[in-house]
Image (cartoon, grey):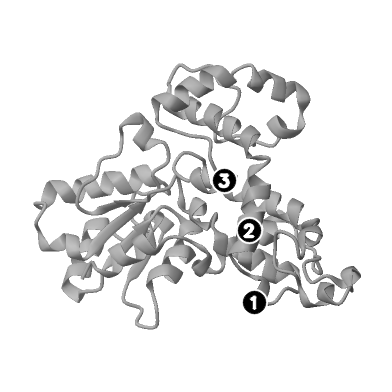
Amino acid sequence: MSREQMKVEFHNAVKTAVMTKRPLVVVEGKDDLSVYIDLINSNDNKFNVKPIEYFKECTSGCAEIENKVTFINEKYSNSHLVYKYFKGVVDSDAKAFRNEKNERPGILYLNSYSFENSFVTEKSIIETIKTLTSVSREQLNLDLTTKVIDLINTRVTEFYYITLEALRNAVEEDYDSLLGFSDGYERFIYDDSQKELLEAKYSDLDTFAQRHNITNGSILQMKDFCKGKWHLHFFLKSLLHFLKELHQACGQSITQCPLCEIGDTENCLYKKNTDMNVAQLISVIKNNIENSDLNYVKETLRNMA
């Protein structure tokens, strides 16, 4: 039997969800699967969470889910019982900026570009500092997260314009772009010649941003227009960068640790005691669903039936 023959017919899976009263939640692909299982399946295992490629004639991606939801919409009225037992969860991507976001029964669009944006949070800062330093719960407070966010925001402007350039490429069909979201962003931070090319576009990009009500504020405010993988990578890489010097703020803009209180600054608890690269840290952060701000998704899905 071929792999395609082993797959499940989508409409049958939806009907089974209704008959068994076990809601079916369909996500974009394997990367999303563990996140949503951790988010909504507690000990009761109430939900049947599957990636879209689990079903016949489907590959991964939001378009596949949207097409299947359209198929269900054509078979059942908006008030039909079926929608209490079925939901497709879809990244917003650039749809809102292209006027392509079609809210309808059976589909739940994230309020961020993709699910990775949801891990760019104060909780992820706390998790990182707990993992890589010796600070206690006493020091893990608002002063600390505010200090770290302020530090990251000192270098966010370049990243903001890189993101605008990629977003404009995704929104305007004939735009002559320097990069898209399928490319890497870091060369525009570290390569002076690439930086100059982008800087020449800043004024036009400001106009584009104004047209779409986008502002350059905080790293935490980029969730709806920045590719999630870019956003989380830049956030955590910047966090690792500033963590090297965080101990210098001990007792000044952040709560003084006990060792510095007695003059033992050499062993400041804010100093890193564990090495970890960005890829490893991303895995740590994503493995704890509590680091995300996906509660609105959890509430919507757990109220289905």
Establish if 14 lies above or below 159: below
* Residue indicated by mark 2: 282
- Residue closest to the eye, 29 or 292: 292
Horizontal and vertical percent for residue 148? 66, 55
Q: Secondary structure at mark 1?
A: helix
Q: Judge depth for marks 1 and 3 and give the one in front.
A: 1
Q: Earlier in the sequence, mark 2 or mark 3?
A: 3
Residue displayed at 42% across by 68% down: 39
Q: Secondary structure at mark 3?
A: helix
* Residue indicated by mark 1: 137
Q: Please, what is the three-letter code of the amino acid marked with disc 3?
A: Ile
Q: Is residue 18 left or right of residue 2?
A: left
* Residue indicated by mark 3: 219
Q: Is residue 7 visible?
A: no
Q: Is residue 171 left or right of residue 234?
A: left
User: Where, quadrant-wise, is the C terminus in this rendering?
Assistant: bottom left
Q: Judge depth for marks 2 and 1 and give the one in front.
A: 1
- Disc 1/disc 3 C-alpha distance (Å): 24 Å
